[in-house]
Image (cartoon, grey):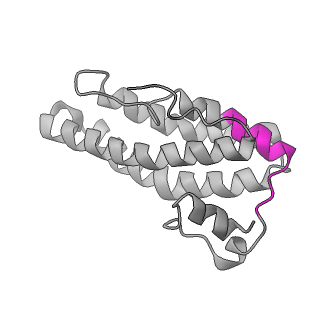
Amino acid sequence: MKWQDWLEKWGMTSLKIKVPFLQMNWEPQDADKAAAWDLYVELLTRITTQNLSANEGDEASALSSIHKIFDLTRDVMKKNGRACFEFTKIAIVVLNQVIRPFTAKWHKISVNNGFSDEITRNEFRQELEDIQKVLRIYTQMLSEMAAVENLTELEDI
């Protein structure tokens, strides 16, 4: 299967990836599977994929949890080494094109005490729901790469 086909399968064609990479074969190896599993577990158990109802949690903690995905992903790539090429390709794109714009916008607002405003908190929570949809798909992609059962919809929330 080509990368382009794999991304189409998951509806992730809005990611901007250069054509030569899209035409490469998608062939996860053992290191990719191990890396995908490591990050899958992290994403599955964080606010990245879990609902945050209006009366739960706080925005700053949710933002921090999503931002930690950068460090977690870097650690996973280092731990699993240079052989996790397929994992690294999708992980870097998701970090830079999905997570970074969200965290960059909301970090600035957060440090300027923006979460003290109810309208801003509501806007954050709406954008959090939007990014969660994409990150749930990413988590499902990682489960496939790791060759494990997809547990993103295990709970009836």
Left or right: 29 with respect to 131? Answer: right
At a point 81% along the width and 40% down the height, the residue shown is 80
Residue 89: percent from left, percent from top: 69, 58
As drawn, 141 above or below 157: below
Q: In the depicted view, which residue is nearer to us: 102 or 15?
A: 15
The quadrant the N terminus occupies is bottom right
Q: Farthest bottom residue? A: 19
At a point 26% along the width and 43% down the height, the residue shown is 126
The quadrant the C terminus occupies is top left
At a point 65% along the width and 44% down the height, the residue shown is 142
Q: In the depicted view, which residue is nearer to us: 61 or 107?
A: 61
As drawn, 12 above or below 153: below
Left or right: 125 with respect to 102? Answer: left
Say whether residue 34 is magenta: yes
Q: Which residues are magenta?
A: 26-38
Residue 79: percent from left, percent from top: 79, 36
Q: Farthest top residue? A: 56
As drawn, 50 above or below 81: above
Left or right: 69 with respect to 109? Answer: right
Left or right: 93 with respect to 23? Answer: left
Q: In the depicted view, which residue is nearer to us: 39 or 141?
A: 141
Q: In the depicted view, which residue is nearer to us: 128 or 73?
A: 128
As drawn, 73 above or below 82: above
At a point 64% along the width and 55% down the height, the residue shown is 90
Say whether residue 35 is magenta: yes
Q: Main secondary structure of the magenta part?
A: helix
Residue 127: percent from left, percent from top: 31, 46
